[in-house]
Amino acid sequence: MTQFCSHIAPLILIFHVLFTNAFIDNQILKRDTNTTNTTSATTTNETLLCNGSADLCDLRYNQVTYPGTHNSASYNLKFDCVTSAKSCLDRVAPCAEEYTQCNIYYKVHCEAQTSICKRRNPNYLHWMCDIFDRTCKSTNAWCIIWLVGCAEASKLCNAWANSCQSTVPDWMITCMWDNAGYPVLRQLDDGIRLLNFEMCLKNDNKTVVFCHGNGLYLATGLELDPVFSEIKEFMDKNPNEVVSLEFGHINDKGSTYYTISHEIQSYLEKYFVNSTTGHSQMVQLPPADSTNATAWPTLRQMIENDQRLVIWFAELYDSLGSDVKPWVHRLDNYYIPSFTYTGDVFTPQQLNASFTQHCNNATALMAADKQLWKYNRWETIDDTVGYVPQGIEIALHTHTVPNNLCLKDLAIDVNYDLLMYFVDTCKEKFPYFFRIRLDYYSQSYLFQAVKKMNEYNVLRAKNNTKFP
């Protein structure tokens, strides 16, 4: 189906985007009239709408597909020069130790090479091998060359730290890191019901912030309060909406997990647990392997109980240990982010091939997943492609804005027909798709794709087709 990935003529693309944006804004406006009530719509004179649809009310949480955004808080970002320079220095820090090891063992390497020389040559040429051995052991020149190279690398890191704030142009921030296009409250008002966050530490590992990127390419954004307050505002004004939050961590390895996970959990409790009554707006789901259908809440039950927020932690979950609250769920136990098999995708053609192969191998993949986990986890559609860092670096060196390399440009190529192709190709091959998540949802068929998936979910529920 590579025809979906072909280049669109610029003029057609402009009209296409303008028409689609107008259509989406109209759909959002219609949807808001149904879902932004400040009081519950559960009176006898009104039909309850769950996430904008009466048909979804009696489906369980794990029978509904949710529209989501990727790196949902990747706005108001600043390039993190301090972390970037530290990451650079961390890469060259082992140089001194490696130089010491080189000095200790370089004579051993000389002897090993001499032994190889003698094995490969007749006895009357062994004198050449002995000369090599004496020459090799007489100097540690190779070790010194290595150390000098490392020292030069350290100088470059320090120079980058001093100049990166003025060197990184404004376009690069938006180009590389802005995924959603709008603040969180706008996303929720528009109909997004799954928010994905990447978290980091800054200010000498004291402050938890939303971020995007990693290592040399890290940009940091808002702290927890402004984003959580917007989510709280939306939840209180829209009592018939069920929302899911995902938290991940991409900066550093496991050393900062503990601080970040505990801080997020503490803030979730601060905003979504009533300090007087103890009531939590965050629901506790049954274990991932539960086959008891009645154990899974329907959207109607979640709304009536005002437990409409579902919390997912990725690799941060394990660092909570015994401190974990019952309303925090380990993401990997329940569903498979498609990023696990599309992580190296940089073009629409590659994304097409990855999803097509994955869905065509559904039977074998489900068998393998069940063998490993003893049950089948939920599937997802993460319709995203990544920019190529080398292209960004070339643009920086040449002082030019990259053409068709930025996230917004890449999103246009995969957010329309290709997205619908994935839905049509994959929806009947797996038991359940939990989310459809992408970049720049305002330029996409996201809500149309989710609607089609949920119409299929409703049909399966009415026909008692087996769900997970």
Image: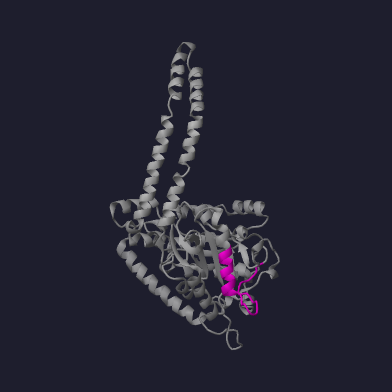
| 291 sits left or right of 380 in the view | right
Q: Quadrant location of the C terminus?
A: bottom right
**Residue 240: x %, y % from top left:** 57, 79
Residue nearer the viewer, 57 or 138 = 138
150 up-or-down from 288: above or below: above
Residue 82 image-quadrant placement: bottom left
Q: Residue at x 52, y 80 (%)?
A: 35
Magenta residue span: 262-285
Say whether residue 405 is visible: yes
Residue nearer the viewer, 425 or 336 = 336
246 up-or-down from 54: above or below: above
Residue 87 belongs to the span the image colors magenta: no
Residue nearer the viewer, 89 or 267 = 89
Farthest residue in the left direction?
A: 399
**Residue 15: x %, y % from top left:** 33, 68
| 32 sits left or right of 300 in the view | left
**Residue 49: x %, y % from top left:** 56, 79
Say whether residue 390 is visible: no
Q: Give the image's coloring scheme.
A: one colour
Residue 274 belongs to the span the image colors magenta: yes
Q: Residue at x 50, y 60 (%)?
A: 201
Residue nearer the viewer, 463 or 92 = 92
183 up-or-down from 131: above or below: below
Farthest residue in the bottom direction?
A: 45
Residue 183 image-quadrant placement: bottom left
Q: Quadrant location of the N terminus?
A: bottom left
| 416 sits left or right of 395 in the view | right
**Residue 292: x %, y % from top left:** 71, 66
| Number of numbered markers | 0
Residue 255 image-quadrant placement: bottom right
